[in-house]
Image (cartoon, rainbow, N blue to C red):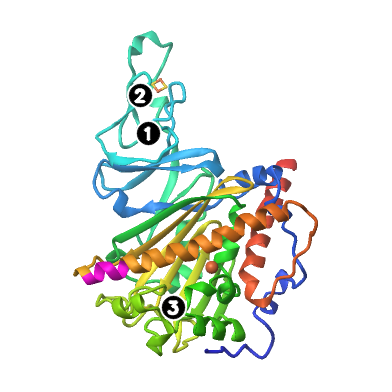
Amino acid sequence: MPHFEKPVEGSWTQHYPELGTSPVSYEDSLSPEHYELERNAIFRQTWLNVGLVEQAPRTGSYFTKEIHAARTSVIVVRDADGELRGYHNICRHRGNKLVWEDYPREETRGTCRQFVCKYHGWRYGLDGACTFVQQEPEFFDLDKADYGLVPVQVEVWEGFVFVHLDPNNEVPLREYLGRFATWMDGYPFGAMTEVYKYRAVVGSNWKLYIDAFTEFYHAPVLHAKQYISDESTKLMSFGFEGLHYELDGLHGMVSSWGGMAPPKDESMVKPIERILRSGNFGPWDRPDIDGLDPLPPGLNPARHRSWGLDSFLFFPNFMVLTWAPGWYLTYHYWPTAYNEHVFEGTLYFPPAKTARDRMRQELAAVTFKEFGLQDCNTLEATQTMLESRVVDRFPLNDQEILLRHLHKVAGDYVAAYEKAVTA
Ligand code: FES
Ligand SMILES: [Fe+2]
């Protein structure tokens, strides 16, 4: 079990004195009132990843994204010039949702030349301009030029499409994402187009699931049954230490060991993993694509020989995990209430070339689902008991630095918003 030497001058957390080390409150996860503040303060004030460029490959291709927390739905479409544009998904006549299929709350995608409202047939070009009003002369002094779709800012980083819902936002996406995006420059995201996606409604505050995925302290205990029993006993007795933790403004990252891909000793893993050469850490054999060997210089910041994965949390709700064997994962946490959110976990691999490759990816995907379910289970149990408010302060250890940071950043956004609205 590798152990990373900590810097002599203190713990990870103590490098960021503004975080403090005292026990924390979870009051930010327990009330409808606080969630209402977060909706405006956070989800209308930050860059949100809503999809990938592959979802809108050609002129006229579009997709929608429901952003309940920000009380809106957005359309992202590729216009006649090949640029991505974004709009609030609302018709300017009487407010019908413009783009949806059978169920208005479900996301959709497709290709069109224009958007036509289902209600009275108003039409909009890909550039958002209102181009047709049914029985136009019956309106009073209506100028179509005043009734274009309401735009939202759209920017792309490494194929990830982001929107910003504040029309006054002046921070470009790349600047917002900061140092960690630079660390990943050159990573072959674009070559990993084989996608396995899970979506789940989870009965907890959105931040609690992020908490579970930004520390590995729980791994030997909560996921004990994922390992063969000898390995599990060993992990429990040693505990777990990450290799590196770092914060950059709003964002945080943790780097972790990865002795399971391939395992040092194949008897550490289950027979199906040995036969397929795949498992929780993904297919063991790194695909032969540019950008993985060597890796972008920012990955594996501890330069540890047993490196397994880096997890990056881009505030507020987007995580990217790059794995040593050459694939990546994303997590999204979309709040729907103070005690509920939609979780999306998506695995990305290079397209399989053989049936065996495909089986390896499938095994990685189902193993990931098992882990995810174990984590979710705990969240709902945690949410219900936090709400009892029998205990109001919780100690966080050094490996829980990213949680401490997340709740602080989220709280800072809410405080700034409250100050601005009462000013
Ligand atoms: S609400 Fe869209 S055309 Fe009337
Ligand atoms: Fe977990």
Which range of residues does the magenta coloring cover? 356-361
4 relative position to 323: left or right: right
Which residue is drawn at the image coordinates 52% and 89% (left, top)?
Answer: 1
Q: Position of residue 255 (x, y in %)?
A: 51, 77
Secondary-structure class at tag 2: loop
Tell which of 412 and 100 is nearer to you. 100
Q: Which residue is drawn at 34% across and 64% down?
A: 348
> Which amino acid type is shown beneath numbered disc 3?
Leu
For marks 1 and 2 on the same chain, the one whose residue lies earlier in the sequence: 1
Nearest the viewer among 107 and 339 is 339
Sequence order check, earlier mark of 1 and 3:
1
Dots 1, 2 in contact, CB < 8 A: yes
Q: Is mark 2 within 8 Å of ligand 1?
A: yes
Mark 2 highlights which residue?
A: 118
At mark 3, the secondary structure is: loop
Asked if residue 395 is among those painted magenta in the image, a careful observer would answer: no
Query: What amino acid does circle 2 point to?
Result: Lys
Mark number for residue 100? 1
- Residue count near mark 2 (Cα–Cα under 10 Å), binned few <14, some 14–19, many ≥20: some
* Quadrant of res 121: top left
Q: Which amino acid does label 1 sit on?
A: Trp
Q: Mark 3 points at which residue?
A: 299
